[in-house]
Amino acid sequence: MSATRTTLTTGSLLVLAVLFVALIILSNMFLRGARLDLTENHLYTLSEGTRNILGDIDEPINLYFFYSERASRDIPVLRTYATRVRELLDEFVQVSKGQLNLHVIDPLPFSEDEDRAAQFGLQSIPVGANNETVYFGLAGTNSTDGLSVVPFFQPDKEAFLEYDLTKLIYNLANPEKPVLALISSLPMTGGFDPMTRQPGQPWVIYEQLQQLFDVRVLGGDIDQIDDDVRVLMVVHPKNLSDKTRYAIDQYVLGGGHAMFFVDPQAELETPLNPNDPSAMFAEKSSDLPELFKAWGIEYNKDQIIGDSGYALSVSVSADKPPVRHLGILSIEKSGLDTSDVITADLSTINVAMSGFFKLAQDSKLSLTPLIHSSTFAGPIDASKARFLPDPSELAKGFQETGEPYTIAARLSGEVSSAFPDGKPQDDSAEGAQDTASEASDSDHLATSKGPINIILVADTDILTDRLWVRSQNFFGQRLVSAWANNGDFIANSVDNLLGNSDLISMRSRAT
């Protein structure tokens, strides 16, 4: 009896062991990617925006996941995150209904796979005493040989993982990027730094726009905005010719989508002569008076908003405590429109020396605030901010009005042209003779074809790196880390003007 019981017990244990191993194998085969999501924002659950984008893929997309599994054997953080990435990729494949093909590759040293990873533009990092290289990135290709990559997956960016993957797939599924035309007097593209006499670094927001759109920089006199421009972005308009302002006017009246950034005090406006000591006192404002008047908008380029409610503390010098700066504001959730898809899921937006908008009393348009000050705010003469060694000076004579001020807003409704007499004449002799290039009266739009839909922002510093990102060099690659939602606000606004709500929901959810 004892021997039989022992035999049965041993046999039962063997059966259980076999079943357990089989269960593990089957789980790995069929349940890869399945997980219980207990995170606050359900970061481990595919969002509706991702599912919509994956469901709209028309042609197959190949994903090449390069992960140096052997070389990273002693890096537990990387191995754990690699599992997370692989599981999410598997889930993407399942939801795509056969349109995504995933290839998992361990690029061994001196192999064709390693050469291919380098050709795709993936980033490798040396690890260990033997300087083994680790690849941990993704390359995607479509049927037209389009390429989009994540050079290296950073574990500290896990919150953005789903968005980064979804954006990569969206770009491959929609290879023809919409055209964004940019008119800017600020060095967003990097330009030339007169102080260092070296090419400047492009602003992060400009680089991000390039990833999402076909950015077309416009300069000089502009006769018209091309028909293929989906969104027009005008930043710090200074000294625009009548011809250019007319082109903007007609683009908006024709139903074109646009964002306008004006500023009473643009901190990064480059002086014409940086060696001139008086340059620091120069006026750095911008305005579109004719257009704003036609649109029923009141904006004073000589006033900035001071706000003791959202004021940031800044360091003046190492031997002094931080000082609250009434002109540099960190606008929290209470200052954002939570009912608008652009700002609903954002937390913090930083602005500096911002102006404000009001709707004219006789205006029939709708001005819907997206970003506004607190009620502890009031206007300050912009001249006080032109050279400000001590931010506490702004508090002298400052008076709160008890009302919020609109810093960014949607403007919608039907409008008339700011040029009722039609296209301005070219003053040059050559232009006067060349009447063939002039638009005929029949081409002139006196009123909008329908309700306009544009976004106004009374600050240009919202676009600058210093107010929302930190940059670091990672083995020759520039890596940025956002600490505010400025970039999300800009990208969300453009996406919304284009009608792409899925990427908006993804971006805001990640942030």
Image: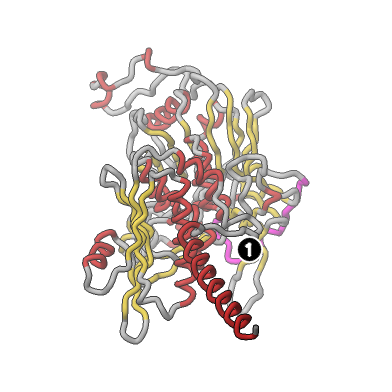
Q: Residues within 10 Å of mark 1 (few under 14, many from 20)?
A: many
Return the residue nearer the eye: 362 or 431: 362
Q: Is residue 176 above or below residue 315?
A: above
Q: Is residue 277 left or right of residue 367?
A: left
Q: Is residue 316 above or below residue 420?
A: below
The residue that label 1 is drawn on is 391
| Residue type at tag 1 | Pro
Asked whether residue 8 appears in the rendered view, the answer is: yes
* Magenta stretch: includes residue 348: no
Q: Is residue 234 left or right of residue 122?
A: right
Q: Position of residue 154 (x, y in %)?
A: 45, 66
Looking at the rendered image, the quarter that the C terminus falls into is bottom right
Q: Position of residue 346 (x, y in %)?
A: 61, 51
Residue at 43% x, 36% y is 231
The residue most toward the top is 442
* Span shown in magenta: 384-402
Total tally of numbered discs in the picture = 1
Residue at 49% x, 66% y is 22
Q: Position of residue 67 (x, y in %)?
A: 37, 67
Return the residue nearer the eye: 405 or 123: 123
Q: Is residue 429 above or below residue 67?
A: above
State the image quarter where residue 1 is shown.
Answer: bottom right
Asked whether residue 383 appears in the rendered view, the answer is: no
Residue at 30% x, 21% y is 438
Q: Is residue 396 left or right of residue 223?
A: right
* Magenta stretch: includes residue 389: yes
Q: Is residue 223 above or below residue 416?
A: below
Residue at 34% x, 47% y is 61
Q: Position of residue 224 (x, y in %)?
A: 35, 28
**Helix or strand or loop: what does disc 1 sit on?**
helix
Magenta stretch: dominant SS? loop
